[in-house]
Image (tube, grey):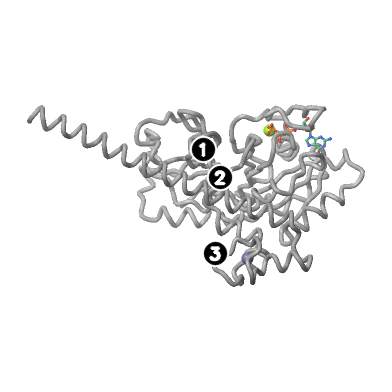
């Protein structure tokens, strides 16, 4: 019933069973390949193309990787299928909104290079969103050809997340990327997240075997990237997997990842549960298990500081986003009332 094309696009049993009661002679599932300001690049069974978004379509909140049900002839969008996984963050700036990054990702490649970009605090952010979405994460360390001691970076990464696979690669060499094959099966979706200039697009180009995406040398003075990629898009590999390339993010502000953070910092969060006071701030309260672990040298102070900062940030962002939402809702109700009062005045 579902064609090989749809299965190759990633329509596995999780999505298939959501379509059991739909009449697929008039509707068809399509996947979001690329999101533009006012439209979507879609791919489906016998359709590939751009669809303009209008009115109610925005309510579907489609993001790259999503599966949508569309009318077979008009390609009018009907609904968004339930997501297998979802990455989001707080939108940059002062907007206090949630921003969806990608949906229906099977594996996340967290990309960092073996240079000044390598930053434990940043990796922990990416790990938290992967844990929250229950997506398998792989730490991919690039530019091994440019450093003498790759092992130093690999060990740091391993210590950060003992359960997470770490792969060190030269992204310019296909042979070096063979270690990523286990995650690149037919129909699998793999997102690449990481700072600008770490080599996300280079990985995609090398694995695809074609230079489809523009890449650009990083700045020499501070090794920062130049924000070369500007939109999120899916790329097909010869082996049948989908790589989701993303623009390097200047800031990944966490929101809605409390469980993810608990998981990433499990050695701290587990101890914190046992502190004498349930509202312990882990500063200098008596019976604080976290401070005890610091004293014993079981936990590094820097790791505790990073945990504190992320927990605070996450709960602050949750609160401000919730506040914004309720303000938006109240405003929506006000508009509705004004319109209906106006109509009532006008009479029938
Ligand atoms: N020597 C070496 N250079 C690499 C490697 N990976 C990436 N580069 C180079 O690093 C530069 C930046 O790579 P990109 O692939 O554009 O980085 P990106 O992560 O896509 O960056 P944004 O699109 O800005 O987010 C390019 O000049 C690449 O050729 C690597 O493993 N070794
Ligand atoms: Mg790029
Ligand atoms: Zn405590």
Instruction: Give the quarter of the image for residue 286.
Output: bottom right
Quadrant of the snapshot with the C terminus: top left
Q: Which secondary structure, mark 3?
A: loop
Q: Residue furthest right?
A: 148
The numbered dot on residue 43 is: 1
Ranked by sequence position, the earlier of labels 2 and 3 is 2
Marks 2 and 3 sit apart, C-alpha to C-alpha, by 48 Å
Where residue 66 sits: x, y (%)? Answer: 50, 44
Read off the residue under disc 3. 279
The numbered dot on residue 213 is: none
The numbered dot on residue 9 is: 2
Q: Do the residues labelled 2 and 1 touch (CB within 8 Å)?
A: yes
Residue at (61, 72) in percent of width and height: 274
Ranked by sequence position, the earlier of labels 2 and 1 is 2
Instruction: Give the quarter of the image for residue 345.
Output: top left
Residue at (69, 65) in percent of width and height: 291
Q: Quadrant of ligand 1?
A: top right
Where residue 199 sits: x, y (%)? Answer: 74, 37
The yes-or-no answer for disc 1 within 8 Å of ligand 2 is no
Closest to the observer: 263 or 185? Answer: 263
Tell me if mark 3 has few (under 14), some (14-19) or many (20+) residues whose alpha carbon lies within 10 angstroms of its own.
few
- Left-right relation of 169 to 324: right
Q: Which mark is in front, 1 or 3?
A: 3
The yes-or-no answer for disc 2 within 8 Å of ligand 2 is no
């Amino acid at each position: 019933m579902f064609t090989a094309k749809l299965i190759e696009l990633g329509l596995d049993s999780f999505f298939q069973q959501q379509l059991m009661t739909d009449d697929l002679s008039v509707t068809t599932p399509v996947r979001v390949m690329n999101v533009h300001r006012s439209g979507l690049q879609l791919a489906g069974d016998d359709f590939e193309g751009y669809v303009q978004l209008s009115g109610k379509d925005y309510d579907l909140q489609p993001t790259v990787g999503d599966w949508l049900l569309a009318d077979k002839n008009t390609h009018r969008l009907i609904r968004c299928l339930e997501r297998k996984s979802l990455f989001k963050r707080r939108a940059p700036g002062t907007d206090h909104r949630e921003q969806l990054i990608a949906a229906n990702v099977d594996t996340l490649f967290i990309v960092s290079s073996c240079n000044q970009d390598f930053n434990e605090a940043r990796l922990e952010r990416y790990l938290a969103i992967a844990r929250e979405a229950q997506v398998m994460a792989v730490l991919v360390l690039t530019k091994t050809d440019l450093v003498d001691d790759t092992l130093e970076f690999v060990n740091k990464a391993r210590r950060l997340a003992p359960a997470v696979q770490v792969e060190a690669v030269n992204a310019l060499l296909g042979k070096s990327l063979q270690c990523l094959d286990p995650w690149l099966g037919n129909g699998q979706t793999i997102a690449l997240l990481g700072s600008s200039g770490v080599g996300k697009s280079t990985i995609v180009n090398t694995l695809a075997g074609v230079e489809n995406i523009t890449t650009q040398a990083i700045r020499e003075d501070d090794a920062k990237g130049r924000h070369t990629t500007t939109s999120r898009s899916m790329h097909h590999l010869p082996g049948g997997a989908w790589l989701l390339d993303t623009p390097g993010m200047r800031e990944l502000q966490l929101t809605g990842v409390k469980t993810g953070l608990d998981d990433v910092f499990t050695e701290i969060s587990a101890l914190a549960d046992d502190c004498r006071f349930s509202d312990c701030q882990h500063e200098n309260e008596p019976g604080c298990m976290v401070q005890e672990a610091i004293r014993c040298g079981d936990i590094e102070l820097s790791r505790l500081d990073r945990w504190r900062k992320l927990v605070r940030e996450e709960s602050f962002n949750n609160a401000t986003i919730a506040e914004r939402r309720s303000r938006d809702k109240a405003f929506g109700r006000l508009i509705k009332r004004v319109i209906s009062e106006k109509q009532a005045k006008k009479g029938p």
